[in-house]
Amino acid sequence: MRLPNHIGVIPDGNRRWAVDNGMTKDKGYRAGLDPGLELFKLCEKEGIKEITYYGFTVDNTKRPTIQRLAFTTACIDAVNMLSKENAELLVVGNTESPMFPNALIPFTLKRQTFGKGGIKVNFLVNYGWQWDLKEYLSQNEDKKDVLNLIKSRDISRVDLIIRWGGRRRLSGFLPLQSVYSDFYIIEDYWPEFNPEHFYDALKWYDRQDVTLGG
Amino acid sequence: MRLPNHIGVIPDGNRRWAVDNGMTKDKGYRAGLDPGLELFKLCEKEGIKEITYYGFTVDNTKRPTIQRLAFTTACIDAVNMLSKENAELLVVGNTESPMFPNALIPFTLKRQTFGKGGIKVNFLVNYGWQWDLKEYLSQNEDKKDVLNLIKSRDISRVDLIIRWGGRRRLSGFLPLQSVYSDFYIIEDYWPEFNPEHFYDALKWYDRQDVTLGG
């Protein structure tokens, strides 16, 4: 089976799930923590080399404060959970804004090995595609690959993007690493995560060709 | 009905269609010309304001010469066909490479009005996402929107991307204008274009929300 090296995860639908289950929208994020850990363990088991979680974006921070605090807390908790696993962890996002949680600053400085290391895990926190690309404006090195000039340059090209919650869009997720990614959409909401989602995505990916335009 | 302002068109599957119909791969491109015009007329009729066709990319030019010549000829013919319509036409791509057809150079200089004008039509010819983004490296203006700093800056944000031929990826199509685009995939090959594809895509788009991350 041809496996993706790098999987991008867009864990959408937390708010819709909360409302469908009689809760206020902010209550949806906490329910996304266990799925995140479960997916990590499945990736580890299957030998995936890199995984990137879409935590929250600069755009997301315009939402009501109660929601913003809830998804920020969920991201802090998620990164702390992952730091108890065997992983090489890096948090990427705009740390210069007050929306960035101080608790995660240490994870942004360089990729750190936890436990025995192994799978690379990137977690996007207060990430913005404009923020990501503006960095390389100041690093004019004409001959280099654009991918080496952006703020998220420690994150490699994404092979497979899995999005929960039925929407068929990137929503600003790593635009340059995603230029050749295959998109797999799951209608279920992220808190409804189920290992079958992951295996269906891998089976589907195995049937795609990789041409990079050639 | 909520209509997209700007539709991106990825007309894929020409080669697979040719092979399925007992022809060599290069013969598939010519069969994509009539669909392109038909789709243009449908967009015009429904009041779409802008349409971008993915002609060919820098990556595509690595294909066998007979195919390269065939898709280049098809792009020249397509642009000439569109220039007989009421449209505001612009060709965007790397004109400094020998892969760019001389016949299309006049269309790259500025957007030109044909007939009574109206719908904006962008045609990507020898387009490369690295080429597109490298331009703005030399235009360091910190406060500006990145979208105003790239080579394809005359092309606005894309609302809906329709891809024929079943693949679920962007393949380098305008990565910055596509950050919030909704993707609609049609399994049929581009030469099998059918107005129903277009109307199904519009109906689907009407059911999506537009949040831009908010």
Image (spheres, coloured by chain):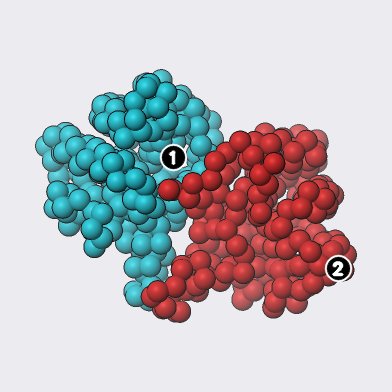
Chain colours: A red, B cyan
Which label number is shown at residue B161?
Answer: 1
Q: At x 69% / y 36%, what residue is drawn?
A: A203
Residue B100, given in percent of the width and then of the height, sits at 23, 54
Front residue of A67/A5: it is: A5
| Mark whose residue sits in front, 2 or 1 | 2
Residue B187, given in percent of the width and then of the height, sits at 49, 27
In 3D space, how far apart are the residues under numbered discs 2 and 1 (Cα atoms)? 43 Å
Q: Is residue A71 left or right of residue B116?
A: right
Q: Chain of mark 2?
A: A
Circle 1 crowding by C-alpha within 10 Å: few under 14, some 14–19, many from 20: many
Q: At x 78% / y 35%, what residue is drawn?
A: A196
Which label number is shown at residue B172?
Answer: none
Q: Chain of mark 1?
A: B
**Residue A99 seen in the figure:** no
Name the residue tied to disc 2. Answer: A116
Question: For the residue marked with disc 2, what is the amino acid?
Answer: Lys
Tell me the quadrant of the picture where the N terminus of chain B can be found. top left
Q: Is residue B40 left or right of residue B198?
A: left
Which secondary structure lies at badge 1?
strand
Circle 2 crowding by C-alpha within 10 Å: few under 14, some 14–19, many from 20: few
